[in-house]
Image (cartoon, rainbow, N blue to C red):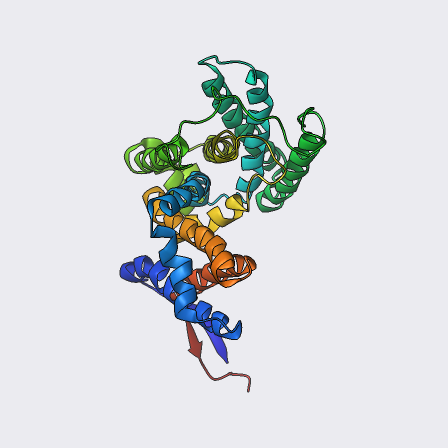
Amino acid sequence: MIQVQARTDSSTLMQFASPILAILLTLIFGSILFVALDKDPLQALHVLLIMPLSDAYNVGEMLVKMGPLLLCAVGLSLCYRANLWNIGAEGQLLAGALGGSAVGLMFVDSDSSLALPITLVAGILSGMFWAALPTYLKIKFNSNLILTTIMFNYIGLYLLVWAVHGPLRDPDGFGFPESAMFSDATLLPTLVESGRAHWGVIAAILSGIVAWLIMSRTHLGFQIRVFGSDAPAAKYAGFSSNKITWFVMLFAGALAGLAGVSEVIGPIGQLVPVVSPGYGYAAIIVAYLGRLHPIGAIAASIFLAVLYMGGDLAQIEMSIPTAVVGMFQGILLFFLLACDFFIRYRIVLSKDANA
């Protein structure tokens, strides 16, 4: 019979090699997929992985996609290190976009220097509020955090759709479901004049550095690590599980909210029904690909952003469906979890004693 046994000592080297192995397996699977689609696999992989970095414009567009992925992934990394399964980054991102837009539209005819910081704060607070709701349910009623955060994703999405079709719709927009364009005072400055990459990318990288400092250099970070590894030991040591839960969830909500508001006052320039192509969900893959380490999330977010950008280019250059990118993300997560499983466990064949 087949048995699964835990390894007494897992390899540290393999823990770091696991993401690389998962990426290689994903590329092999992708090549088989492209052959099945009657596409040249080498050309497809070149378009998917190399072309997004081929010139300054494509790199800028890649950075635009990297920013929200990294912001969400950094927050999720802290949640998962605390063994809190927050799946709600997508909803918190949309809440940040909605809350920031509602405030930003108050400055449509204004050139106040306070317009941008107030809008950013509104987006951050909206993301925190959206994260606080399932956190309260978790602490007060011990509800399942996975289920509540997923459900709040859909509530946030339909609230945004309602707002953009209703109270936030541009009255001069000929009935299209979109808000008015934000004023220049509200928009995030771009890094270079010829591209759309904005200062939100810098904020995302800084968030990874700050989170790393919190986790590695502060007593709070030590509490989070202990709480995630052994909750009874953390309780015995006097660490407050409620305080840790509130901190990591609100921190994740703040970063996701910043990602959302940065999208609408950055590359989009207005509130539209589709703010995110699924950044909050893809950030789960980024977090695990980065080994739940804030700095590792930076490299992982670049890889996922390249996949997003490459998917757009593959559709244009080779008529490959954009759904292929979603399949790549799912297969990557599958191989990553599979590699991690075999690092911690092994399959043993043994004779059935009852046979």
How many marks do you count on the picture? 0
Q: Residue at x 32, y 32 (%)?
A: 219
Residue situated in front as seen by the camera: 263 or 99 = 263
Q: Can residue 255 be seen by looking at this rendering?
A: yes
Q: In which quarter of the image is the C terminus?
A: bottom right
The residue at the far bottom in this view is: 355
Residue 236 in the image: state x and y as whole percent: 41, 38
Residue 81 in the image: state x and y as whole percent: 41, 44
240 vs 286: above or below: above
Q: Which residue is drawn at 71% across and 32% down?
A: 165
**In the image, 322: left or right of 296?**
right
**In the image, 164: left or right of 92?**
right
- Quarter assignment of residue 8: bottom left
Q: Can residue 233 be seen by looking at this rendering?
A: no
Residue situated in front as seen by the camera: 66 or 291 = 66
Q: Which residue is drawn at 52% across and 74% down?
A: 36
63 vs 9: above or below: above
Residue situated in front as seen by the camera: 212 or 190 = 190
Residue 17 in the image: state x and y as whole percent: 31, 61
Residue 91 in the image: state x and y as whole percent: 58, 38
Q: Which residue is drawn at 58% across and 17% down?
A: 106
227 vs 39: above or below: above
- Quarter assignment of residue 213: top left
**In the image, 344: left or right of 277?**
left
